[in-house]
Image (tube, helix red, strand yellow):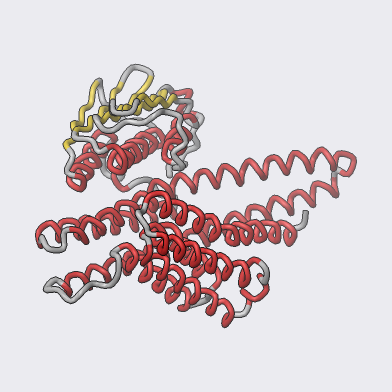
Amino acid sequence: MTPDDARHVADGQLASGMAALPYLVLAVSAGLTLLIEDTTPAGRLAILGLTALAAGWTLWMVTLHPAWMANPKAAGLYVAGLVGFIAALGLLSPWFAGFYAFTGYVHSWALLRGRWRVVGVAGTAAAAVTGYFGGLPGPDPAVISSYLLFIVAITVLVVLVSLFGDITADQGARSRKMVEQLAEANARLEETMRENSGLQAQLLLQAREAGVTDERQRMAREIHDTLAQGLAGIITQVQAAAKAKHDPAEWQRHLDNAARLARDSLAEARRSVHAVGPGELESARLPEALAEVTKRWEGIHGVRVEFATTGDARPLHPEVEVTLLRVAQEALANVGKHAGAARVGVTVSYMDDVVTLDVRDDGAGFVPGADSGGFGMTSMRQRVTRLAGTFEVESEPGGGAAVSATIPVGTAVSATIPAGEAK
């Protein structure tokens, strides 16, 4: 495969994913609305009708006529219509503002150029936030605060989506460059080893797929552990602020939390782009970093957290400390989103040959192994097992949950981790 062929394959896969995205999120949004929301027959008909029109708009403009998207005017027209459907459907149900709006962010960034990207993203954010809040602020004494909250929410979404788009473009360029380099190496080897060209091509293909898969998994983990968590937290705080708009102190607290989460997410995203470890571990070791993370989480969620260290704390390989910190952050994020717990315990235990992290809560619990549709458990397990560690989850409905990660800290394990690989 030539470099041009490899690039065309990668671009084709991206285009296929973009074309399929609207139909998936439309189906999910409509299904959740019809199953959960208490709507009238006329409301159901309106939802189904608008959903069909939105699907038809993307089908006609993108799926059936993809060449039109090369024309800036046609792409702008399509995105304008897409934003209109997001606004209309979002006013009917916040599920569309939460899920279908993702199509607007992705297609605006991928199909528009220059400043029009930001315009498309801002329009999508405005439509989504209006749907979240059930419409524009009304004429009440708190209207100025309500409009300020609208502006803050839209600005945060535009900044985060723009940053995410830059990160994705940067990673896409790196992946394409890697594919091109491997394809060029394949061509040179075919010339010098013609008698083994078939076997050599197969081995190189396997190596390329493994490298691309590993990079995708690493980026998926980093995006999930930074941007995804940050966005989820910001949305939660903005929604809480909207409900507390008549309580100035509570409104300000949620708004401050959203701003702090946005700053932290921006910082972590930049560190991920430059392959720098978490900021918490820059000037502190693992116990101090975990103590800071639990304290910050406790302040945001208002849930008591008991943190403890057992054994003789000692420096570990940077990758081991990064892994345990990320597992703690993801476990706490899951507790905040799903558990409804009153108490949480975090313990890091140093033993002779291993170090163990335990995160426990007294919340709603769940059935381990059940498909939740998320990436959190998979991300934690991948991080731990790639260091020859073990990852265990114990829970039952109504009985709380416990997450445990155990990683060897012997010299043999440390030697298998390339220096500077901590992300």
Q: Residue furthest top?
A: 352
Q: Residue furthest front?
A: 41
Find residue 388 and report its horizontal and vertical position in percent.
Answer: 48, 26
Query: What residue sits 28% from the left and 53% below the top?
Result: 236
Left or right of 225, for residue 263: left
**Is 60 above or below relative to 190?**
below
Observer-nearest of 317 and 135: 135
Query: What residue sits 74% from the left and 39% below the top?
Result: 203
Query: What residue sits 18% from the left and 76% below the top?
Result: 139
Find residue 88 and report its horizontal and vertical position in percent.
Answer: 41, 70
Determine the image quadrant of residue 202. Answer: top right
Query: What residue sits 13% from the left and 56% below the top?
Result: 250
Q: Residue furthest bottom?
A: 73
**Is 90 above or below relative to 317?**
below
Determine the image quadrant of residue 391. Answer: top left
Q: Is residue 54 something that shows in the picture?
A: yes
Q: Is residue 166 something that shows in the picture?
A: no
Find residue 29 and report its horizontal and vertical position in percent.
Answer: 45, 56
**Is 166 above or below relative to 392?**
below
Q: Quadrant of the C terminus?
A: top left
